Each structure stands twice: as C-alpha cells, then as structure tokens.
Image: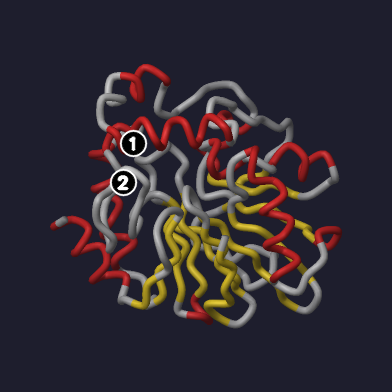
C-alpha cells in the first residue's frame, strides 16, 4: 500500500486492487471509501500514516456500494461513524437490493488469466460479501459536506444508481470513484479509462453523466482504481471516452 498526501489534508491510499482517501483537517478525520473487508488493517494503517488517529474518524463518505469500497463500513458504523452516500445508494447500503457484478459474470470471463488472478485475489479479501448497515445518510449533490476538506458531491449515476464523485474545489481535486479510473487489475494499460463494462449497472446512464464531471474545475484526479494523476478532468474524461 502507498499512502501519499496529494493535496493539503487529502491522503491517497493506493493498493493493488482498490484505492481510498483519508481526509485530515484541524484534528478531524474522514474516509472516502474503505477498501475490501479483508483490507481493514490497511485502512487503519492508512489513517496512521496520514498522522491521524483511528478513534478520530468521524465520517465515511462513499462513492458507491460495491464491496471493494465498503469493506470497513459495518465496523465503522457500529462505532457511531456517520456513513454518507448518494440517495439512490442507500437501499443497497441497507441490503435491500444489489447492483454489482455477480459470480456468474466473473466465471464466464475466468478463461482470461487476468480475470482468474483478480478473482482469486478478491476472494481472499472478502469480495463475495455484501456489507450492510442500518442508517446511512444521503448527501445532496452540490452541497459541501461537513467533513474534513469539505468535499462536494457530484451525482454520476450509472456504475451504480447512486454513484457519486466528490469534488474538492479548494484543492482542485476530484475523487471519481469508478465512474472513470486510471487503471485496473483487468486492464492492460494505465491512464484515464472506463472500468470493464460488466461492472456497470447502466453504462448508457453513466456516459450521459460524464459531461457533468468534465465541467468541474479540477486537475488532480483521484480514482477508485489506478494511480492519482495530475490532469484536467475534462481531458481525463475525453481520453477515457476515446480509450
């Protein structure tokens, strides 16, 4: 795991299979996503490397409800940590429905060596689980959150119905979740790109929302998968669409 302060108070934790953010400001701490269930120790370590205390984590902000982004969610919620996500994501966080790739989706692609390696890796990390909690809170697009670094929700439905990116206007940064990534275990290239289509709930809906992402003022892209990149988000979206 690499943990790097990419902007003032924004720490980017990158692992082989997924990324998350640690936000630190005036002694307050929040997370944006939180890895697989089997990465709980790494999530805690990332907070320590950011110079913060695990006991000070006050909020978990989620881009979407896939197990690689919600692994530590139940344990955090049990401690009273607020869990915030797009309104359309809340039924999934409560376990009322699922919008994610199925075991069958993976098995029909398992003839590809990269898929088989990835599937075995995530299985060890709890990739078949569906973490749930009882009382997630909805964010409002365009309204800054009362958490460290004041991320602004940007609704980007399609990967899941309530998928949300988070813009940090004061830092010129954007956490894109899985709407656009810069690499993935199943991809042979790095750079702005779309994640493999079988992961998306509604690809057409996602593509229709991308102009909203491209209009933002940000030149630091912090994806759910792949490295952080310094690149105007409009150019990153354009390159991903052409990839």
Tell me which residue sits at (78%, 70%) in the image: 52
Instruction: From the top left corner, tell me how far across and down residue 156 is, in percent.
Output: 39, 50
Residue position marked by numbered label 1 in the rendering: 200
> Measured along the vertical axis of the image, is residue 102 above or below residue 125?
above
Identify the residue shown where x is 52% and y is 60%: 14
Q: Does residue 95 lie above or below 163 as drawn?
A: above
Q: Which numbered disc covers residue 61?
A: none
Where is residue 220 shown, x and y percent of the image? 41, 75
- Horizontal side of residue 223 vs 124, given as left or right: left
In this view, 185 is above or below 57: above
- Residue plotted at (48% across, 67% down): 167
Q: Badge 1, how many Cα within 10 Å: few under 14, some, many 20+?
A: many
Residue 216 vs residue 178, the one in the foreground: 178
Residue 23 in which image quadrant? bottom right
Please identify the quarter of the rendering in which residue 54 is found: bottom right
CA–CA distance in space, label 1 to label 2: 8 Å
Residue holding disc 2: 195
Residue name at image x 56 percent, y 30 percent:
92
Q: Nearer the viewer, residue 80 or 7?
A: 7
């Amino acid at each position: 795991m690499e943990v790097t302060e990419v902007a003032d108070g924004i720490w980017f934790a990158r692992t082989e299979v997924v990324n998350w953010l640690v936000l630190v400001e005036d002694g307050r701490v929040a997370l944006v996503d939180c890895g697989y269930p089997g990465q709980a120790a790494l999530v805690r370590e990332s907070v320590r490397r950011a110079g913060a205390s695990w006991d000070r984590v006050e909020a978990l902000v989620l881009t979407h409800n896939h197990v690689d982004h919600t692994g530590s969610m139940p344990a955090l919620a049990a401690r009273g940590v607020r869990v915030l996500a797009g309104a359309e994501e809340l039924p999934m966080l409560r376990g009322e429905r699922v919008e994610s790739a199925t075991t069958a989706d993976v098995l029909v692609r398992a003839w590809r060596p990269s898929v088989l390696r990835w599937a075995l890796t995530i299985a060890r990390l709890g990739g078949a689980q569906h973490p749930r909690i009882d009382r997630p809170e909805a964010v409002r697009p365009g309204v800054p959150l009362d958490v460290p670094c004041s991320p602004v929700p940007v609704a980007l439905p399609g990967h899941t119905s309530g998928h949300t990116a988070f813009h940090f206007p004061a830092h010129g940064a954007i956490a894109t979740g899985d709407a656009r990534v810069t690499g993935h275990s199943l991809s042979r290239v790095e750079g702005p790109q779309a994640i493999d289509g079988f992961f998306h709930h509604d690809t057409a809906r996602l593509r229709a929302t991308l102009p909203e992402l491209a209009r933002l003022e940000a030149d630091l892209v912090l994806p759910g998968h792949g490295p952080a990149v310094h690149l105007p988000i409009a150019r990153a979206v354009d390159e991903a669409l052409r990839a």
